[in-house]
Image (cartoon, coloured by chain):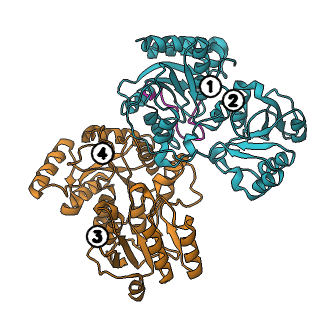
Chain colours: A cyan, B orange
Amino acid sequence: MSHHGDAAPSGHWGPPYLLYLGNPADDLAIKTARGVAYWRPDWCVGQYRHPDCRLTLGLPDMDMAQARACGARTMLIGTANAGGTMAAEIVADAIAALDAGLNVVAGLHHKLRSHPDIAAAAQRNGRTLFDARDPAPGIPVGNGRPRAGRRLLTVGTDCSVGKMYTTLALERAMQRRGLAADFRATGQTGIFVAGAGVPIDAVVADFISGGAEWISPARDDGGWDLIEGQGSLFHPSYAGVSLGLLHGSQPDALVLCHEPTRRHMRGLPHYPIPELKPCLEANLAAARLTNPAVRAVGVALNTSAMPAAEAEALCRQIGQELGLPCQDPVTMGVDAIVDHLLACFAN
Amino acid sequence: MSHHGDAAPSGHWGPPYLLYLGNPADDLAIKTARGVAYWRPDWCVGQYRHPDCRLTLGLPDMDMAQARACGARTMLIGTANAGGTMAAEIVADAIAALDAGLNVVAGLHHKLRSHPDIAAAAQRNGRTLFDARDPAPGIPVGNGRPRAGRRLLTVGTDCSVGKMYTTLALERAMQRRGLAADFRATGQTGIFVAGAGVPIDAVVADFISGGAEWISPARDDGGWDLIEGQGSLFHPSYAGVSLGLLHGSQPDALVLCHEPTRRHMRGLPHYPIPELKPCLEANLAAARLTNPAVRAVGVALNTSAMPAAEAEALCRQIGQELGLPCQDPVTMGVDAIVDHLLACFAN
């Protein structure tokens, strides 16, 4: 990861991390912890799990005191659930971590600092709480004014289909080629990985596009801002976030992300996954409002639930159908997508 | 207004109202007070103006003590300041109203209850403060599940083109025909007029569609929920709010609202107003995600800046072009739109 702009987050809450898994409902519930472990392994000393937790990140199991003894500075609560509510056991574990001398960071809608017992535990131990879903103050209303620099945004057929992984893979691949390229985080996992960003689904609704403008300001070094997408224009719960992010990003390039084995929109069994081509076209049409020159440069599939040969065949098929490079960023890399991006914006 | 579902707001802050004008910069600054005075005249006992205020709502002028003696229960601060800050004189007047025994309600960005002197005055007088831009707690994430009942949503080419007036005019016209029809408020003025609602541009971004579902729950009386639209899918600052509201409303019927003399998107001189037909089509396409049977039933023009003959001609022209009834709700009523709505949903 040596090429990355991956300086540890400033302030008191940074790594090394103890990654909190608790007792998650399913693998998607620990995607924040998994993302940090995957993209910033050097920052993670261990994982904390309840006895009946059957999931693992492959890190050493330890409790809060052991983690502190191993050099952990902060416990990162990576558990996510719809709406971001905080279970009683998470409250108790956060307090135990503070009492063990760790800072605690989380990305839930319910704030750590809003819970009186957690706030009291932080104060009595002189520890720091950080809620990644707390937007920085002062985000303005979006103004839609064209700005310098090039921006790529990942968009998706659904939530949780690999937009952050794709964006970080693009950053890594472009930086390895010596290009100026910076990941811009819009979700809690991305913020923990990047050490900065705007939790775009947590801003006040009037400020969604303004938040996107704020994290990807004008740049004149010829480099790219690679903006982490959120949700999907076709997800009935969250499409407003996706549209504001699309407008505020003013993307020059879109990469469409998809999980081919997904049977329905996440959390909504009554909603089918959109077809790739109309989904991409709807994103391009909406993006043209603030950047008429926007174009699609690739498709990224999350094929982790498929045999490798099937995944390769599907990438070829989708690539031919859409006339775009199609890869799984984790198993195949993103070099074909970067090649096409650079060819599209050669001059 | 006797046909209306206009029960006074519950809780301690309801009408009768003293409408606060203070010393407004221009007519736009008193649009909340004007809207309440227009749609709920029976709730308004008077207006409070500073000596050099040249604007009027045509209500009796009175100070706070006189208003209290005339039966007013609550002072409604409808002033919108440049920058949304609370001027020192508004703070002083709010305190004077509380000391005179009135409750105080407002729809400013800065909350009444966040100002220590106002909060102290409310407490020492046993009065209530209410900020219309504070969403109620407990709004869930949208689920997109089809629900019983019929819903109409107003959508717009831009912000501030008459969506609230159109929606309230539809409520009045339908109630006069003996139909069950209820205005559902999504902005501060609408909330004061209806006595309830969700300030949809002030919810956390993840909850936009959930807020829309929350204010228009399933109904089985054969009646209509008439939902106040916000912003525009084509406004680069606020389109996310508009899309989430569109998805959460699951509208059966759309009415497109437009201000024909508007030269550019509100606040954004570099963005043109969209054409009516593609604007309507984009709204219908997006609405089909949660209600595939959605249809357009009318166009509402705000022609207040045009001569009457020109307005009539324009309504005829647009009505023919779009194949829909087109009226100015304030000067022409909305009967043709209601006729078409009922014809479309006759069975």
Main secondary structure found in the magenta portion: loop
| Disc 2, SS | helix
Q: Based on the picture, tell me whether residue A271 belongs to the magenta stretch.
A: yes
Report the quarter where the C terminus of chain B lies: bottom left
With B97 as the anchor, is B58 left or right in this view?
left
How far is mark 1 from mark 3, CA to CA?
57 Å
Residue B285 seen in the current view: yes
Nearer-N-terminus badge (4/3): 4
Q: Would you place residue A60 above or below residue B13 in this image?
A: above
Do the numbered discs 2 and 1 sit on residues whose CB atoms are within 8 Å?
yes
Q: Chain of mark 1?
A: A
Query: Where's residue B210, x and y in %?
Result: 52, 51
Q: Which mark is residue B176?
A: 3
Q: Are marks 2 and 4 on the same chain?
A: no
| Disc 3, SS | helix
Residue matched to label 4: B157
Residue matched to label 1: A165
How far is mark 2 from mark 4, CA to CA?
41 Å
How far is mark 4 from mark 1, CA to CA?
37 Å
Q: Which mark is residue A35?
A: 2
| Amino acid type, residue under disc 4 in the picture | Thr
Picture quadrant where residue A29 is located:
top right
Q: Which residues are magenta?
A: A261-279
Nearer-N-terminus badge (2/1): 2
| Amino acid type, residue under disc 2 in the picture | Gly
